[in-house]
Structure formats: structure tokens, C-alpha cells
Amino acid sequence: MTDQRTLIVHPHDAARPYAAAAVFGGTIWACGQIPTTADGHTPPGMAEQVNVAIDNLETTLRAAGGGLHTLLKLTVYLADLSEFDAYNDAYLARLQGIPLPPRTTVEVARFRGAKRIEIDGVAAVDRPD
């Protein structure tokens, strides 16, 4: 059997020991996207971190042939579940107008640095009609 995966490199030429996403059978499997900008900055507030993480997810999905509008499933990891409302408000504002995919949100411990959130997703490759 031949390897029919396509591995997507990280945006901004960031060297990492894993792919940003894998595409297989019309499905995009994106790695966890953190709230770090291209210049290495992590904003302090939850709303800003949500927006940066979703921006990073969108960049990865586009590189793989999809977009936020093709999302099939999201998993969101929060450093503190008491920040759910702030995260959810920013999430809903950022994805306004896009059909919301199924989502799982869990609390995890020990993010590195100032990071409070990580988002991974599964999306379809965009197929124009």
C-alpha cells in the first residue's frame, strides 16, 4: 500500500518535529494550534488567545485545502475551565456566520508559558461544486 497522505508544513517556516496537518481521503487532521503569533508573541487575554489560535488553525486548514467553513470537529483544551465563558464568547464571535462544528472542550494542566488554550480540528478538503 502506498502512502497517500499529504503532510502540511507549519506556517511561518516554523521548524517543528511534527506536521501542522495531514490530509488523507479528503479529510484534514490539524495538529493542536496554540495562541502564538508568527513573531512568537502570546497575547495575555483569553479572547485574544482564542483569536490567535483560530487564526493559526485557519492558516493551517487553508494550506491543506480547507478552511474554517469545512470544519467537521474541534477539540479545545483550556488551562482553566473557569475561563469557559470568556473562551466561548470569543469563539462564537470569531466563528460568526460559519456553521459551528461539533466541539469538545476539556481542561488540561501545565501549558508552557502564558498559553491558556490549544485547539485541534478535523476538516474536509474544500471541493468546489
Image (cartoon, grey):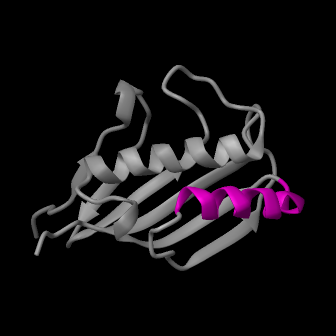
Q: Position of residue 109 (x, y in %)?
A: 81, 52
Q: Nearer the viewer, residue 27 or 56?
A: 56
Q: Is residue 76 magenta?
A: no
Furthest toward the right, the residue is: 82
Q: Is residue 11 left or right of residue 127?
A: right
Q: Nearer the viewer, residue 6 or 58?
A: 58
Q: Nearer the viewer, residue 9 or 85?
A: 85
Q: Is residue 23 left or right of residue 119?
A: left
Quarter of the picture holding the N terminus: bottom left
Q: Is residue 60 left or right of residue 95?
A: left
Furthest toward the front, the residue is: 97
Q: Position of residue 13 (x, y in %)?
A: 35, 25
Confirm whether residue 19 shows in the render.
no
Q: Main secondary structure of the magenta part?
A: helix
Confirm whether residue 110 shows in the render.
yes
Give the residue at x 46% y 50%. 57
Furthest toward the bottom, the residue is: 102
Compared to residue 104, the image places residue 13 above or below, namely above
Give the residue at x 45% y 69%. 98
Q: Is residue 93 magenta?
A: yes
Give the residue at x 27% y 46%. 63
Magenta segment boundaries in residue numbering? 80-95
Compared to residue 46, the image places residue 126 above or below, namely below
Q: Position of residue 128 (x, y in %)?
A: 13, 69
Q: Quadrant of residue 75?
A: bottom right
Q: How many marks?
A: 0
Q: Is residue 101 left or right of residue 103?
A: left
Q: Position of residue 56 (x, y in %)?
A: 47, 43
Quarter of the picture holding the C terminus: bottom left
Give the residue at x 61% y 59%. 93
Q: Quadrant of residue 78?
A: bottom right
